[in-house]
Amino acid sequence: MKLINNNITIFIILLISIITACAGKDARNYKPYLVGGLCEYKEIMGTAVISSIADANSDDLNCDNEPVEVLFNFMPDDLNAKDDYLFPNISDSNQKIKLGEGLNPSKDYMNIKGIIKGTSHKCIRKEIVKGTCTPVLYEFSQIDFSDYGEYCW
């Protein structure tokens, strides 16, 4: 009986050693995994015109400081580009500016960034061609929104 207990103990120690060695190797080579792989987008250059800025609905995902819902209309630089949209069912009209994980921005932040009703801004419509991310994104190419947090809370 003692021989069986010793064999089980040796087996468990060996198994733990193997698992630890494998985990260590994987941890050194770890790369973030994204379901469907990294995403790639086709870019369509254009302009976004701010069509509306209004108080955000309190039920929405909002910044704490005076959140606003900002709508814009996108127009591609090449008017024929719409014929080649991969997602023609996603309209370029009444798109919303969302920050971070989908927050409506603060009113002050939009003013600081020059986002005012009627203004035009360089914008890119990005349509997914590889991966499983959001199918269509809009990126304001000349505005850095990375500092929104200091105006949000």
Image (cartoon, grey):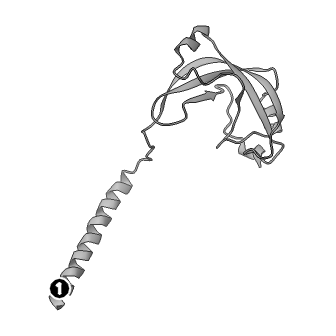
Q: Going by the picture, which residue comes out furthest to the bottom?
A: 1
129 vs 28, left or right, is: right
Residue 117 sits in which quadrant? top right
State the image coordinates of residue 87 (x, y, percent, origin top left).
54, 23
Instruction: Give the residue displayed 78% in from the left and 35% down from the top.
Output: 69
31 vs 111, left or right, is: left
State the image coordinates of residue 106 (x, y, percent, origin top left).
79, 40
State the image coordinates of residue 17 (x, y, percent, origin top left).
27, 69
Residue 44 sits in which quadrant? top right
* In front of the other: 36 or 106: 36
State the image coordinates of residue 28 (x, y, percent, origin top left).
37, 54
Q: Of the residues shown, which amino acid type is indicated by label 1?
A: Ile
Q: Is 149 above or below relative to 69?
A: below
Instruction: Give the residue displayed 45% in from the left and 43% down from the top.
Output: 34
Instruction: Give the residue displayed 69% in from the left and 36% down from the top.
Output: 98
52 vs 84, left or right, is: right
Q: Secondary structure at mark 1?
A: helix
Q: Is 110 above or below relative to 15?
A: above
Q: Going by the picture, which residue comes out furthest to the front?
A: 89
Count of marks, rendered view: 1
Graded by Cα atoms within 10 Å as few (under 14), some (14 to 19) or many (20 or more), the crowding at tag 1 reads few
Residue 145 sits in which quadrant? top right
Assign the N terminus to one quadrant of the image.
bottom left
97 vs 17, left or right, is: right
Q: Is 107 above or below relative to 75?
A: below
Residue underneath mark 1: 4
Instruction: Give the residue displayed 53% in from the left and 25% down from the top.
Output: 127
* In front of the other: 111 or 33: 33
